[in-house]
Image (cartoon, grey):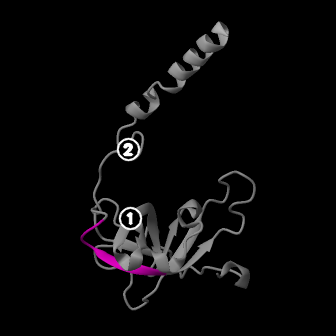
Amino acid sequence: MLKFVILLGLLASCLGSESTVEKSLDGKIVGGHSTTIQEWPFMLSLQVSYLGGLFIFHQCGASIIGSNWAITAAHCTEGMSASSLIVRAGSTNRYSGGSTHQVAQIIEHSGYGVGSTFSNDVAVFRTLNTSEALIDSRINPCVRASREVLIFYTAEDMT
């Protein structure tokens, strides 16, 4: 019985100790540094809107690849409906400045989610209003194609 009490006390002290790993993490990205939208004009804040826009939270970063297309990680859009996502373009601040755009369509890589790895962790999405392009004089795509870039997908990819 005494051995059990001692073992239980040791186990409790191990489980109750503070994590030293968490305390060493400072900021959002390990080894990262602050920057501005002027340095990275193709960056977007992918945001989730709850209760009709009453609550909006930053979900992930994304990069502009076309006038109404952007790319992000598939784990950022997994289980999300396009109607619950918006993007903020042209602002260093996640919650003000720049312009916001409703997401209309999400296409996750067809190989994402197979097994328990993050293989093929990529998704593209299109914004709703094609007359209000993500790109303007201050906001540019992350790559400039020498000719038109086409995005191919099957009917199965469209949800």
Identify the amino acid type marked 1.
Phe
Residue 128 against residue 44 in the figure, above or below: below
Q: Residue at x 71, y 85 (%)?
A: 155
Magenta segment: does it hold 91?
Answer: no
Identify the residue position indicated by label 1 in the image. Answer: 57
Circle 1 or circle 2, nearest the eye: 1
- Compared across the picture, whether 159 is left or right of 132 comes to right
Instruction: Quarter of the image for the C terminus: give it.
Output: bottom right
Q: Residue at x 40, y 39 (%)?
A: 31
Q: Residue at x 66, y 80 (%)?
A: 152
- Compared across the picture, whether 152 is left or right of 72 comes to right
Q: Position of residue 112 (x, y in %)?
A: 68, 62
What range of the chain is rendered magenta?
A: 95-103
Residue 118 against residue 126 in the figure, above or below: above
Q: Position of residue 67 (x, y in %)?
A: 44, 81
Identify the residue position indicated by label 2 in the image. Answer: 32
- Compared across the picture, whether 63 is left or right of 153 comes to left
Q: Neighbour class for label 2 at 10 Å: few (<14), some, many (≥20)?
A: few
Of the numbered discs 1 and 2, the one sitting upstream in the chain is 2
